[in-house]
Amino acid sequence: MFGEKAYILIKELDRSRDSLPPYNTELIGEIGNEIKQLIAQNQEDAQVTEDSHAAESVSYIPTVKIRHAAIKRNVRCILAYHYNRIKCLKTMRWQFGSILPPDVKANLSASEIEWFSQYSNSLVHYMRSIGEDGINLAVDLKPPKSLYIEVRCLVDYGQFELNDGSVLLLKRNSRHYLPRNECEELIRRGVLEHVV
Amino acid sequence: MPLQSAYYPDYYSIDDILATQERIPCKFLQDVPKLGKLNPATEETDLKSGTNLELPIWLALDISTSRQPIISPDLPKVYKEAYREILKADPCAVDLHKFGLHFYELGSYVKKFDPRGDVADILIHTFTLRFRQIMDLTDNIISDPTVVQKLDMLERNIFKSAHDSKVKLISWLMVSEVPLEAASMVINHKKRKRVDEDII
């Protein structure tokens, strides 16, 4: 049956909606081959129909039409696969920050990694261009009520330097009272936990 | 990935691609040479007119609508008279998940094959009556977890986003200060990592 492999590809993406499955180079290649094959067969049959105008020859038009529908379907699946992966990658840029965890990165294709760094660059460029010295759009997602908040450290992060120059050591399970705007990014990345 | 803000499946919609893979019964009106492999029951190279086959809806739509249709599609059995009667009687009592994973999506495609418009009517009837039930469910999730399994995919998505906003509303009403949280993808990523570590 046509389009069977493309369906497997989309199903694989559907199964893990919040994360990215490894880029399936093999299956993409196979679908590409299927498309190429269908096009070649179609060209051949279209040629035959064109050459023989006589009524006695068989009509290949239905065959060509069905194959063409299959080509369109395969193309749609492949495009949707890449589009949705990129969309997920875009969300990741906002949630993980500019550096992806290594195991997420391992699932990307080379061009996806390139896209990610380019997207990252344009984003940084844009954020720098707003106002006089730029705004970081990734912070203050929720309206702040106080300047300082209490946080607990979830992992051994190491040294962390504040804007006023003081350095503190973020050790697992240690508690700190920090300026909100400086630790928000670490909270988003799951290093710190906000204690209410 | 968040649900699309307006419901109309676009070209890249994964849900729509999955829904259009559902098969419907079709009858071939023309001979189709060389494509005998579409019919797994025979080994002939050509497909004769008059053959009955189940084709995925993406193919059926494409080749049944032109001026010289190659196939004539038929309604799948869950949209036929007998099943419509069941839905007309009480849509809320039905396990829609067993009717098909994508009941509404497939329905909105096959309604074209029903000139009298009964299928379109029954889809709206089913949805409006069941929608009230879904909203009730989101308010009382604990009552019976198996009820969710009786929803089709579209209803599940509605249920999920309704439930999420309910949870958000409650937490907003209870606490005045919104705690900062790690991003949802980061949380999921951590959970998965923990599972991997446990295995090792």
Image (spheres, rainbow, N blue to C red):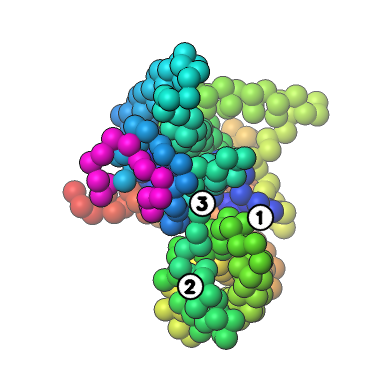
The kind of secondary structure element at disc 1 is loop
Vertical placement of B25 versus B84: above or below? above
Residue B116 visible? The answer is yes
Residue A161 highlighted magenta (yes or no):
no
Could you classify mark 2 by the number of other residues whose Cα lies within 10 Å: few (under 14), some (14-19), or many (20 or more)? many
Disc 2 marks a residue whose amino acid type is: Leu
The type of residue carrying mark 3 is: Ser
- Label 3 resides on the chain identified as B
Query: Which is more N-terminal, label 3 or label 1?
Result: 1
Report helix, strand or loop for mark 2: helix
- Residue B105 appearing in the image: no
Task: Point out the frontmost of discs 1 and 2.
Answer: 2
Task: Tell me, for residue B72, which label it has, or none.
Answer: 3
Counting from the top left corner in percent of width and height, residue A98 is at 53, 31
Q: Amino acid at mark 1?
A: Tyr
Which residue lies at the image location 59% right of the left edge and 81% below the top edge?
Answer: B88
Dot label at residue B174: none
Mark drawn on residue B7 = 1
Query: Which chain is disc 1 placed on?
Result: B
Residue lying furthest left in this view?
B200
Q: Nearer the viewer, mark 1 or mark 3?
A: 3
Q: Give the x, y percent position of residue A163.
A: 62, 35
Q: Describe the element under mark 3 as helix, strand or loop.
A: strand
Number of other residues with Cα within 10 Å of mark 1, as a class: few under 14, some 14 to 19, many 20 or more:
few
Quarter of the figure with the N terminus of chain A = top left
Which residue is tagged 2?
Answer: B96
Whole-number angstrom distance, CA of label 3 to CA of label 2:
27 Å
Identify the magenta region: B40-53
Q: Quadrant of the C terminus of chain A?
A: bottom right
Q: Nearer the viewer, residue B127 or A189?
A: B127
